[in-house]
Image (cartoon, rainbow, N blue to C red):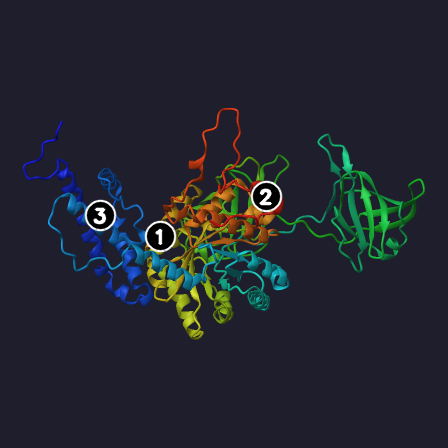
Amino acid sequence: MTKKKSTDGASPGNGEVESVLNELAAIRADMVAEPMRSQPRLARVHPNYQHSARNLLHYLALRRRDLRPLQLRLAALGLSSLGRAESHVLATVDSVLGVLHRLAQHAVQPPAEDAAVMDFAHGERLLAEHTDALLGPATTGRNVRIMVTMPSEAAEDYLLVHNLLQQGMDCMRINCAHDDAAAWAKMIGHLRKAEHALGRSCRVVMDLAGPKLRTGPLEPGPAVARIRPVRDVYGRVTAPARVWLTPEQAPRLPPSPASACLPVPLGWLDALRSGERVTFKDARGARRSLKFVDVTDNGCWAEATRTAYIVPGTPLHHARGAGKPDGREGRVGALPQDAALLTLQKGDLLILTRDLKPGRPASYDSAGKILSPAMIGCTLPEVFDDVQAGESIWFDDGKIGGVIEKVDTARVLVRITQEHVTAMKLRADKGINLPESTLRLAAMTAKDIEDLAFVAKHADIVELSFANCAQDVESLQQHLARLGNRQPAIVLKIETRRGFENLTEMLLTVMRAPSCGVMIARGDLAVECGFERLAEVQEEILWLCEAAHVPVIWATQVLETLAREGRPSRAEITDAAMGRRAECVMLNKGPYIVSAVRVLDDILLRMQAHQAKKRSMLRELHLAHAPIVEPGRAAGPLPGSPLAGVEDRLVDGPDVRQRH
């Protein structure tokens, strides 16, 4: 049946088109007005970021309302739902408005005086240019850069730096919380040598330590050596414990791993021979013995088949023949004290003190009743002036959670609220997070200001840790200005709730320089904002930075298990692939860091053909060529598919791959 046309010649859906057009036109008017309200702030933005800052303000005006109903109405009309507008937001709105005008059969609209200068290609080009300026040129075939945190051994191990650069490192990150200027200079020297050898360039990134709030020292634990043989699931000994005995006057480290290292008198040690034994009573009064299996110039190896606990001063009785003591006795010398810790459970009270007097565990009476709660200090006692009862507190990267019950001049009382299967252990020098407290801490410490002299001279990029507000950014800019004309680019590390909430102000401040960036420091950020909110928070940071054409570094725990243990988890691989949404992905140090760089390089290369920011790239899908196979018959991997050549890669190693 033929549809009847309306009397004005428009299609039956004209009313809906007019309604959507009017709503979107009103939104556009707000977007255009926003930069006018921020003109003084825009005037201070560097010319490199003038268009970008205006685009950011347009985007903020767009996102101040719930666009979901409008998006559904636009999609029903077959139009863009504005879901990928970040880098060219006004151009996207104008494009949709143009189509709506044509659908509504309006006369051709003349271009508005404030028509978008940021077209689709311009926005993406600006982000690419800013990324090149900050992070250096892209590696051939891979747009996302790889940043690697240097371990301390990089100062002495040129080959490590060479191999990292060879495998795809684009940025060397030096954490100023560790090592010193002499070690940093050696790391940079190794990098320059490797750059020359490989014909590659790499940016130097230096991370200011910032005001890290940590737990104070603890009273040392007991000095005891624990000797434990290896047992199977039935408790049977499958391998004896190996014990190294060394002269207490000049102790030597064991040449291979040892269950325990015991310092003893030199004269007594010299008389020992292979095959002989010593007997002793351990700390529990249990009778035990050690059999000597190897005597060297530096010490003796002994073996034990029963568990023993040895403390300083334990007498060791030399035995010959049938094992009877011959009267010669040697006493165990000083032993290292155990690392102290506090054992905490849900419901326990923990006292946080202003001073750094060593803390101690809770004490109990004979009935198991607590006499005094556990106690520990903190490294930044000034936070006591900013916290209030009822606010949450977290320790050790969010592993232990509690709530502040009371605050007085000398201490903060914390009630542990987080449940855990086993008792939680809190040690010295562990991070403290106060996500609900407004802390008046400057982002830069006295040490940071001192380190800046080296950073300004040698680094391409300086990372501002715990960036919380525009004043923190201005402070760093002022300190750098006093140090001379060589100005490294600034990267804001977003790792607190305040930093996230003040991101727009900080972006407009850091954009006063010709080059800048943002790091999503997901470790502290997860604790500060809540683990369940991390995915949402990191998305919002990505959106805002893309609107500002500011490069983003995706950081913390990327392929961490691979770097530390040599094998990644499945979740880590997926997380690394999500890093394709950023302009750079950071890896932390670990024994297998070279392998981690190689794997990340491969993941990013493969994902580049499938994902660009929020946009899915519709590369030819190999599965679409899959033949329909009869049940019971197997089909091998399709040529060119991600699984093609898997067998070869397992044999030849991970470098056998296809760059799409």
Mark closer to the chain start, 1 or 2? 1
Front residue of 265 and 632: 632
Q: Is residue 31 visible?
A: yes
Q: Which residue is mark 1?
A: 501
Residue 475: x and y in percent read 40, 66
Foreground label between 1 and 3: 3
The image's mark for residue 96 is 3
Query: Callout 1: few (<14), some (14-19), or many (20+) C-alpha neighbours within 10 Å?
Result: some
Residue 617: x and y in percent read 38, 46
- Decide if residue 162 is on the left or right side of residue 250: left
Residue 530: x and y in percent read 43, 44
Q: Is residue 360 visible?
A: no
**Image quadrant where residue 131 sits:** bottom left
Query: Callout 3: few (<14), some (14-19), or many (20+) C-alpha neighbours within 10 Å?
Result: some
Mark 1 to mark 2 CA distance (whole Å): 49 Å
Residue at (48, 59) in percent of width and height:
211
Query: Callout 2: few (<14), some (14-19), or many (20+) C-alpha neighbours within 10 Å?
Result: few
The image's mark for residue 648 is 2
**Image quadrant where residue 68 sits:** top left
Disc 2 marks a residue whose amino acid type is: Asp
The secondary structure type at the circle numbered 2 is helix
